[in-house]
Amino acid sequence: MESDYDPPKDALEVLHADHEIVVIDKPAGLLSVPGKGPHLADCLLARVQEAFPTALLVHRLDRDTSGVMVFGLSPHAQRHLGLQFEKRQVKKTYVARVWGHLEPKTGRVDLPLIVDWPNRPRQKVCHETGKPAQTDWRVQRYAEGETRVRLMPKTGRSHQLRVHMLALGHPILGDPLYATGPAAAQDRLMLHSEELRLRHPDGGAGMRFRAKTPF
């Protein structure tokens, strides 16, 4: 899957920068961190460090997901932000287009997740060994054969939103791992990190960062 890695060449889109943090709108198709091998070296972290040499990783988005990512510009900022993610104090909102008509219009998925080891990097629901994972959803609108939905993850498991939507029978459109047939026939994964709410590492003021959904 990674052998055809051809990341977009878009210029870095900086949403916010100050003495402690930089916030970027990550394009779809770009790795957050380098993969194994020189052909997977191009990633958002490397590009951010070219412009902000002290930038440090705090969290990740899947390669095929776009949207808001925050980086610390000092070890203090990295620790401060990292603890906010770990303690689930960061409020995350995503927008997705999913297959079919998702009903009811609001709800919560509460299904434990774990890596599907023989098929990694796929994840799966497992009630015996999975780690707790919760996602709230709110339908924005219905279109022909699909639903536009806001997703608010309460936990941060790998592929959480993708597997939770699949478990509901509504895979995210364009998902190369979890969608099949017509649902997979899109030019990208229709998942975007629209908003992050967090506390600034210097002083703790609440901040909100948004990136317009490109689909």
Image: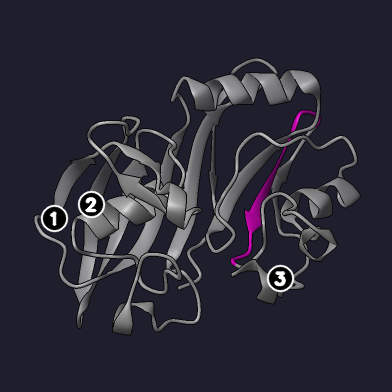
Which residue position holds label 1?
Answer: 105
Q: Is residue 202 above or below residue 181?
A: above
Q: Secondary structure at mark 1?
A: loop
Assess whether residue 149 is covered by the magenta stretch: no
Which quadrant of the figure has residue 140? bottom left
Compared across the picture, whether 109 is left or right of 176 comes to left
Q: Residue 187 at what x, y percent from top left?
A: 50, 81
Amino acid type of the residue that numbered disc 1 sits on in the rendered structure: Lys
Q: Is residue 200 above or below residue 6?
A: above
Q: Nearer the viewer, mark 3 or mark 1?
A: 3
Instruction: Identify the residue shown where x is 19% and y is 63%.
Output: 169
Instruction: Identify the residue shown where x is 23% and y is 64%.
Output: 170
Which residue position holds label 2?
Answer: 138
Q: Secondary structure at mark 3?
A: loop
Which residue position holds label 3?
Answer: 7
| First in sequence: mark 1 vs mark 2 | 1
